[in-house]
Structure formats: structure tokens, C-alpha cells
Amino acid sequence: GAGVSQSPSNKVTEKGKDVELRCDPISGHTALYWYRQSLGQGLEFLIYFQGNSAPDKSGLPSDRFSAERTGGSVSTLTIQRTQQEDSAVYLCASSATPGLAGGPLYNEQFFGPGTRLTVL
Amino acid sequence: GDSVTQMEGPVTLSEEAFLTINCTYTATGYPSLFWYVQYPGEGLQLLLKATKADDKGSNKGFEATYRKETTSFHLEKGSVQVSDSAVYFCALSAPGGAGSYQLTFGKGTKLSVIP
């Protein structure tokens, strides 16, 4: 079946502009995660969605970052007034509902190919 | 907070050499442990996992054992191939806010295997 897809694959923007990044999770996966991969910080968790529950936003680096998930499926990560330090690869991952597939702590996440964001 | 420490790269090995990439973790409770691999130009893929102490995860000739007493999850392979050249990430998953099981990653270790 289809994996996690992300668009665009590459995005170049000017400092101060807003950008939107899209993620289509694997069909049937209720959990969706956004991560950021940058040279200086490695792979960092940003935000988590589970079904219709309130998201876990604890990893968002500033209030310029926001995300939504419509209809429990597609998610959009928005970065407002982009800065050069926002340049990174933004990864989306999805999984089945944590805890249902093999035990309370089992959680296999499937990653998309990422969106490479460059802020000039 | 939770953290993962893995050996810094890059690591360069000749084909058929033995590979060890060290990984240690700090976490409250009992996390699940993972190794993810990122091949050149591709996305992150799960390589292997272990969900409780003394479990051994294995896949494609790679192995790692969940050692609670040493809080470690070292990755090993007896005979590497050129096709194993990639970046390897150790990660843990533990309950977070709102029922999240987000992954906490190490910095990654780049492996290059030369013929």
C-alpha cells in the first residue's frame, strides 16, 4: 500500500514569508507526528496528533510554528515569518494507535520522504 | 528528560568487517528502543526494535539487545556490505504528553563501507 507522502519535496523561501508543508499519512493510521531534521540539532519532535484528541505541541520551537490535522487524516505544518534557522528537513510519520499493536509501549512509526525547507 | 547518546561518526569500514555502533539512553520508565536507518537519498526506515529488557531485535543481519542494566542498545553486524552505507539512528519511545509516543533520537552515525 501507499506510504506516508509529503509535499512539496523541496521549498525555497525568503526570510519573513509564511510556508505550509503537507503530510498524507498511511490510510488507517490514527497517530501522526512531525519532526525536524537539521544539521545542528539532529532529529527533533515537533507535534503529535492522535485521532480527534488535542495535539501534543510540546516540541514546537516557537509560536511561529503551528499545525493542524483535518478529518483525522491530512496534516499541514505552517511556519510563519520564516527565519534562516528554520532551514531543515521536515519529516512526517504516522502509526497505528499507540498501545494497540503489540503492547502498551509498542509504536512503529513510518516516515515520509520529508520536505527540505531552505530559508534565504 | 529522555535522551539518547550514540557514537559520533563517521565510521568507515572495509567490506566484511564487523560493525558496532554504541547507543545508550536515559529515560524514566520502560521505553521501547529502535534503530532507524537512512540510506542516501531515502527516508527514515525502521531497521529493528526491542520493546522490553533482554529482547533482541534483528533484521538484515543487524542485531541489538535491550540491556536495562547498562541502559544500552548497541547495534552490531558481523559482516558489513557496501549496501549498508547509510546513517543509523538510535531512538527510544516512551509515553509523552497527550498519549504521545514520540521518538527521541540520537544524533546519528554515518557509516561508509568501502569495497
Image (spheres, grey):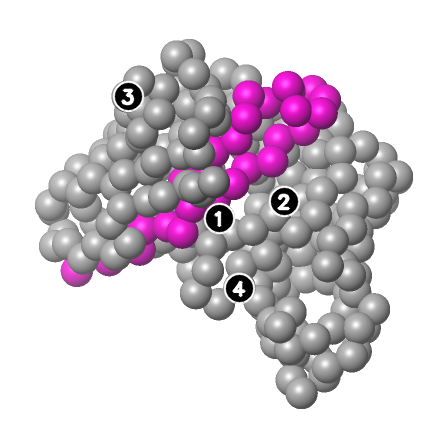
Q: Secondary structure at mark 2?
A: strand
Residue at which label 3 appears: A70
Cα distance, mark 4 to mark 1? 16 Å
Residue at which label 2 appears: B91
Q: Secondary structure at mark 3?
A: helix
Cα distance, mark 3 to mark 4? 31 Å
Kindly check if marks 1 and 2 are in contact, taking CB atoms under 8 A apart as contact. Answer: yes
Q: Residue at x 24, y 49 (%)?
A: A8
Percent position (x, y) of residue A53?
42, 12
Mark toward the start of the polypeptide (1 vs 3) = 1
Span of residues in magenta: A92-120
Along the horizontal axis of the image, is A101 left or right of A82? right
- Can residue A29 be seen from the camera position used here? yes
Mark toward the start of the polypeptide (2 vs 4) = 4
**Given the image, what chain letter belongs to the residue carrying mark 4?**
B
- Mark 4 Cα shell of 10 Å, populated few (<14), some (14-19), many (≥20): some
Query: Could you tell me what secondary structure mostly forms the magenta stretch?
Result: loop
Q: Nearer the viewer, mark 2 or mark 4?
A: 4
Residue at which label 4 appears: B39
Percent position (x, y) of residue B82?
64, 77
